[in-house]
């Protein structure tokens, strides 16, 4: 695991930050990210972010080599699942209002398996480019008729990427360590009269959409934006913000997720730069989120005790972000886990504290061992899949009796 380095504020560059929360994770062995960090708010501009963190290169390597978005069946962004597809269709319609010209060159950076590009194609766009660090994602993009796919990122933009009329950053900036450099790099791929559309989770509403404790303070989401701090990020780096707002998207068949978005274009000499006030809402909103997460965590810990996890062997289904937090913060961390399993094959063969992550079929070899559902976001889907595939193992849901 890599050592973390202190970060300045990703929005304004200041170093004066107040600690809001200390996060810990139990991650797969050899995972390149840190096993914990502080969530802080900037005393100057009000932005919120995680620190200390490994360098940007660690994130580049992670999204290139270990992208969970490369698996079409489980990764978001491909639009394979109906709820994911619905939100991509919605974003495509929003972009069509922003850039009505169907001959405009639209470039999706961090495009995953290309679900948004597929919807833009269906709306009639003829010049579409998708860029993603994961080769498997780019292969999926190239398979979409009429869409060009290139391997790269905001930091390693492909030399063959010609400037676009609209660059889309959909759920990218919350994953980036060196945010300012990423936004500056956009200048090379946005036409002088082109625009950027950036969408991120809306951290001011995390508490209103709480599903699993601290799920938004995960290993990949390292910046927590409000509309205000997102506007400020672009406005202070030579961009003219033309529109911004909030929306909600589906994050599972039954849960919604809050988002903030901004549209901006390169600032011209004739423009009057907009002045963005420091954000005064984010700190309080995140304090509310911490409090709500703590309450939920206590309820889950009580359910662990009720399920007598301390005295039994279990399998754990789900090796994602919620499991990483539950292992660090609840009695699940001291339970005797026989093996972990996950629907996403990218995790098979890893170990967590020496315990292997196996394909789901191997659970049948120990039918008497119960399966703890480690995901709260996709808990209902996992239970449905287990039942449909006639797994004999008893099921333990940690969120079952939570009001
Ligand atoms: Zn700041």
Image (spheres, helix red, strand yellow):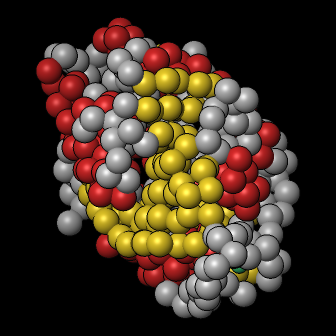
Residue 23 image offset from top left, x and y in percent: 62, 61
**300 versus 239 height, above or below:** above
Relative horizontal placement of residue 104, taking residue 163 as reference (left or right): left
Report the quarter where the N terminus lies: top right
Relative horizontal placement of residue 210, taking residue 153 as reference (left or right): left
**204 versus 126 height, above or below:** below
Residue 274 image offset from top left, x and y in percent: 59, 84
Q: Please count the marks in the image.
A: 0
Question: Does any portion of residue 342 appear in the rendered image?
Answer: no
Report the quarter where the C terminus lies: bottom left
- Furthest toward the front, the residue is 270
Residue at the (44%, 33%) spot, across then down: 128
In front here: 220 or 335? 220
Locate ligand 1 by image quadrant.
bottom right
**260 versus 181 height, above or below:** below
Question: Does any portion of residue 204 appear in the rendered image?
Answer: yes
In which quadrant of the rendered view does residue 160 lie? top right
Residue 366 image offset from top left, x and y in percent: 35, 14
Residue at the (56%, 32%) spot, across then down: 131
Residue at the (38%, 72%) spot, across then down: 245
Relative horizontal placement of residue 20, taking residue 243 as reference (left or right): right
**38 versus 346 height, above or below:** below
Residue at the (31%, 46%) spot, across then down: 92
In front here: 162 or 27? 162
């Amino acid at each position: 695991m890599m050592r973390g380095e202190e970060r300045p504020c990703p929005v304004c560059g200041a170093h004066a930050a107040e600690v809001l929360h200390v996060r810990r994770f139990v991650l797969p062995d050899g995972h390149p990210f840190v096993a914990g960090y502080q969530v802080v708010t900037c005393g100057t501009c009000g932005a919120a972010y995680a620190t200390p963190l490994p360098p940007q290169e660690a994130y580049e390597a992670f999204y290139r080599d270990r992208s969970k978005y490369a698996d079409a069946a489980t990764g978001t962004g491909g639009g394979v699942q109906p709820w994911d597809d619905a939100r991509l269709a919605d974003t495509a319609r929003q972009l069509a209002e922003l850039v009505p010209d169907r001959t405009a060159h639209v470039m999706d950076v961090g495009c995953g398996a290309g679900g948004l590009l597929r919807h833009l194609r269906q709306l009639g766009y003829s010049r579409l480019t998708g860029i993603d660090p994961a080769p498997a994602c780019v292969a999926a993009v190239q398979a979409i008729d009429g869409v060009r796919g290139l391997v790269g990122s905001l930091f390693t933009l492909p030399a063959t990427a010609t400037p676009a009329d609209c660059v889309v950053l959909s759920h990218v900036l919350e994953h980036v360590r060196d945010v300012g450099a990423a936004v500056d790099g956009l200048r090379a791929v946005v036409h002088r009269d082109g625009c950027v559309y950036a969408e991120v989770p809306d951290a001011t509403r995390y508490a209103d959409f709480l599903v699993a404790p601290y799920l938004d303070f995960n290993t990949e989401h390292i910046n927590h934006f409000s509309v205000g701090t997102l506007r400020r990020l672009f406005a202070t780096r030579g961009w003219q913000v033309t529109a911004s707002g909030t929306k909600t998207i589906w994050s599972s068949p039954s849960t919604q997720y809050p988002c903030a978005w901004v549209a901006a274009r390169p600032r011209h000499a004739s423009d009057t730069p907009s002045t963005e006030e420091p954000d005064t809402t984010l700190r309080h909103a995140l304090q509310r989120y911490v409090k709500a997460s703590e309450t939920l965590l206590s309820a889950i810990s009580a359910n662990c005790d009720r399920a007598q996890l301390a005295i039994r062997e279990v399998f754990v289904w789900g090796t994602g972000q919620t499991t990483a937090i539950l292992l660090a913060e609840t009695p699940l961390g001291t339970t005797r886990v026989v093996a972990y399993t996950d629907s996403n094959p990218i995790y098979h063969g890893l170990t967590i504290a020496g315990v292997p992550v196996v394909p789901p079929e191997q659970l049948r070899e120990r039918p008497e061992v119960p399966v703890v559902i480690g995901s709260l976001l996709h808990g209902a889907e996992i239970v449905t899949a287990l039942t449909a595939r006639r797994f004999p193992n008893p099921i333990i849901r940690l969120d079952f009796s939570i009001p």
